[in-house]
Each structure stands twice: as structure tokens, then as C-alpha cells.
Image: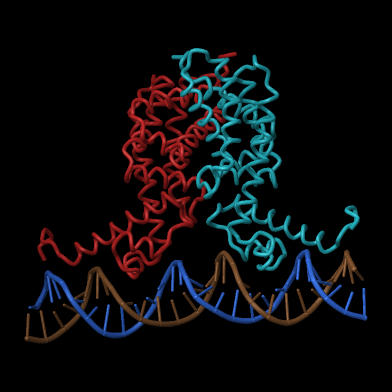
Chain colours: A cyan, B red, C brown, D blue
Amino acid sequence: MRPEKTDLRREAGQRTRDDLLAAALELLAQRGQGGVTLREITQNAGANVAAVSYHFGSLKALCEVAIEHALERYLDAQIRELDALTGSATLSELAEAFARPMVSALVAGGRDLAVMRTVARVGIDPPEGWERLAGKFEEARRQAVRVLAANLPGVDERDLVFRVRCAAGMLNWLAVAPIGAELAAEPAERVERMLIPVVAGAFRGALASP
Amino acid sequence: MRPEKTDLRREAGQRTRDDLLAAALELLAQRGQGGVTLREITQNAGANVAAVSYHFGSLKALCEVAIEHALERYLDAQIRELDALTGSATLSELAEAFARPMVSALVAGGRDLAVMRTVARVGIDPPEGWERLAGKFEEARRQAVRVLAANLPGVDERDLVFRVRCAAGMLNWLAVAPIGAELAAEPAERVERMLIPVVAGAFRGALASP
DNA sequence: AATGAAGTCAAGCAGTCGCTTGAGTTCTAT
DNA sequence: ATAGAACTCAAGCGACTGCTTGACTTCATT
């Protein structure tokens, strides 16, 4: 009954569970929810098909858990970046903070990139009960709109919300489209040097220029 | 043997073929290539399952034809808009021309919107032999980069290409993500008033601003 | 009226899908 | 030692997939 004693059976079970989640995340990132197959997941995870039913109840439930993990991981990183901004942050600093989780994931690849791709795909084809996590999306967007409003006092808030959504959509597109794979080969500072001005420009709009 | 005489059998066959293409386009727009089912297509088209094999050879071939039609329809519209620009067009005019096909489709809905959604999904999950149509994409992008270079003489061309890709990705995202459905309910001038500055800002970047 | 091409149709084939089942293994607890 | 919980496994179920088949209707041609 000592809690620090490792039960080898439970330990192996947790390992199987984690492997299934990792395999599911990878397939979700590559092909989306419709392209995930019970047998392919279990094969990649080195597990039996019955392990999914045992640990998660169903394939859909496994995918929902994997998606939930990915969403939380991404949104936590994004909110952390935005929280670190001072009230007087410039548009470029806002763009930098807003895009940093994506840039990091692109150059890091692996699991971080799979998280990004999965999140972006969820934005296109939302799973059934995803409304439960919509609150965190709202929080990240509200943070960005707040900094944006301080820089663009004259602009209607509906426009600011729209611009944040556009910028988020642009980043998501970089994650899922083949162009993202090209960017992944570039060094991080080059990606930032190209991307940050575009995001900042989308935030600001072209109102002040001919 | 008179060519103007309507052969009722061939006429009905063409009708079935077109209905299959329309049903396939709608499903491709809603769920992507993986979510298209032979029986659902034929049911929506009011045809028998064998009609797909008869008219197209296979489900994949039907989807390829539908995708090809959608790509040509979109790219022709985009290239037409960019061709109409004068050499001295401003960034806002470029953004307007670049985004007009998407804005029109969003407010028009129906088949035009299905075309946009399908094109955007192809950008995420390209079908096998899509390289054959990549040339038209290049043409549209080169047109946009040309106008962009005239407005931003100091910027590296690689950056300009990147910005055009980002803008295209942003528009594609609006087509496939739920936010596009919200925009579809707005009047066209409001969509343009919100969207054009963002696209133009992404083109220009935030270099000239604090 | 006879012929044959064009097209449609219900039925069914082989394969894959998600999921369940019951037996089997491995370890803890008593 | 023994009982039972935790977990894994091969096998198989019904449902669905894309696709084929052969009979059938429809129509222009002759």
C-alpha cells in the first residue's frame, strides 16, 4: 500500500496509454480526425487493438483526450507569452509573443509540431464536444485584443477581434499547409524575421499607408 | 446524325455526371477527401453507386475531376483580378484584387463557397497528382509578387513571396474555419472593410511603424 | 421491327472499419 | 499458496467501404 512502490503492471499500463496517445496525436496531426484508424494507432504504439477500448473506451474517446492535451498545451504556451507582455508593448512585440509558440514548434518539429498541426486541424474540423475548451481560446484572444487596443485606440473592437482571428488563422495555416514544412527547415531567427512583420502588419492594417 | 439533335440518353447521362460532380464538390468542401463516401455521393446526386464507376472509373477519379474543376475556377478568377491591376496599383488595391474572389464566394455561398472550401482543403491535404496544376498557382503568385515589388522596392523578393503565401493562407483559413461561416452572414462591404486592411497590412509588414 | 450502344439498377463480393469476447499472463494482496 | 485485480492478446462479429456484375430500360439507327 506504499504509494512510492512501483506496481509494474500499472506502470506498463500507463506506458501503453501514453504510447497510444502519442500515436494518436501523430496521426491526428498528419491526417485529421477522419484519417485515424484503430489498427494503425495500435500498430504504431506497439499495442493490441483491445488496448484502446480498455484504456479509453473507444477510438473517439482516445482522440478526444489527445486533442484536449494538444489544445491545452498550445493555449497555455500562448497565454503565457501574452501574459508576459507589458501594457505598453508595441505591435511587433505583440506579434512576436503571439507567434512564438508556433515558430518554436515549427523549428523544433516532433511532438511540438504535431501538437500545432492537431490544434490547427481542430480549428477546421472541430470535434463534437469541443465547446468545453472554447473558454481558453477566448482568454488568449482577449489578451491579444487588449494589447492591440492600446496600440490602435481608434479602431473598432470588432475589427480588432477579427484581426486577431486572422493572425491566428494565418499561423494555423502555416502549421497545416505544406509551406509549414518548408519553414521548418529554416533557422528560427529567419522564420521570425519573415513572419513577425507580416503578423504585426495584419494587426495594424494598412490604414496609415497609401 | 445532326449534331443539334438532342440524344436524350446522352443528355441524361451528362446530367448524372454533373450531379455526381456537384455532390462530390459539396462533400469535399464539407469533409475533405477522406470524408467522401461513394454511397453518400450517389445518394445526394440521386444516382446509383455504379454510376460513379461508369462515368469516372472510380471514386478517386471523380474526386480528382471535382478538385480540378474547383482549382481552375478559383485560380482563373484570381488571375483575372490580378491581371486587371495597373502597374501602379497600391497595396490596398492589390489586397482588394487578391481577396475579391474569396469575399465574393463567402457572401455568395452555395457552389462558389464550396469551390473555395475545396481549394483550401486541397492546400492542406494535397491529392496525389496535384503537381499538374501547380503551375497556375505559381502564375497567380508571381502576378501578386510583381505588384508587391513595385510598392515595396527595398524588400527581399523571398520575403514578398512569403507574404503572398501568408495572405493566401489567411484567406484559405477564412474559407475552411468556422469563422468563415460567421463572415458569410455579413454584408459584402463590411467583410471587405474588415478584411482588406488586414491583407494589405500583411503585404506591407509593420516595418514603417513603431 | 430488329439491332446495338448508352445508361441505370439491385445484388453481392472482398476488404477494412470499430469494437467485443474469453482466455491467458503477470503481478499484488492476503 | 491462493484469489483477484490489471493488463494483453488472437479471434471474430456486424457494419461499412469501394467496386463489379449481369440483367434491364431507353433510345437512335437501320
Depicted B71 relative to depicted B57: above or below: above
Q: How many marks?
A: 0
Residue lying at 34% horizontally and 32% vertically, measured from the top left: B81
Depicted B125 relative to depicted B167: above or below: below
Residue B181 locus on image (x, y percent): 41, 39
Residue lying at 60% horizontally and 13% vertically, measured from the top left: B210
Residue lying at 82% horizontally and 64% vertically, measured from the top left: A9
The answer to whether residue A204 is left or right of residue A188 is left
The answer to whether residue B106 is left or right of residue A81 is left
Residue A200 locus on image (x, y percent): 57, 23
Classify the position of the N terminus of chain B by image quarter: bottom left
Residue C3 image-quadrant placement: bottom left
- Decide which of A190, A136 is in the foreground and name it: A136
Depicted A103 relative to depicted A148: above or below: below
Residue B8 image-quadrant placement: bottom left
The answer to whether residue A154 is left or right of residue B89 is right
Depicted A163 relative to depicted A175: above or below: above
Residue B175 image-quadrant placement: top left
Residue D13 locus on image (x, y percent): 54, 79
Residue lying at 65% horizontally and 39% vertically, measured from the top left: A74
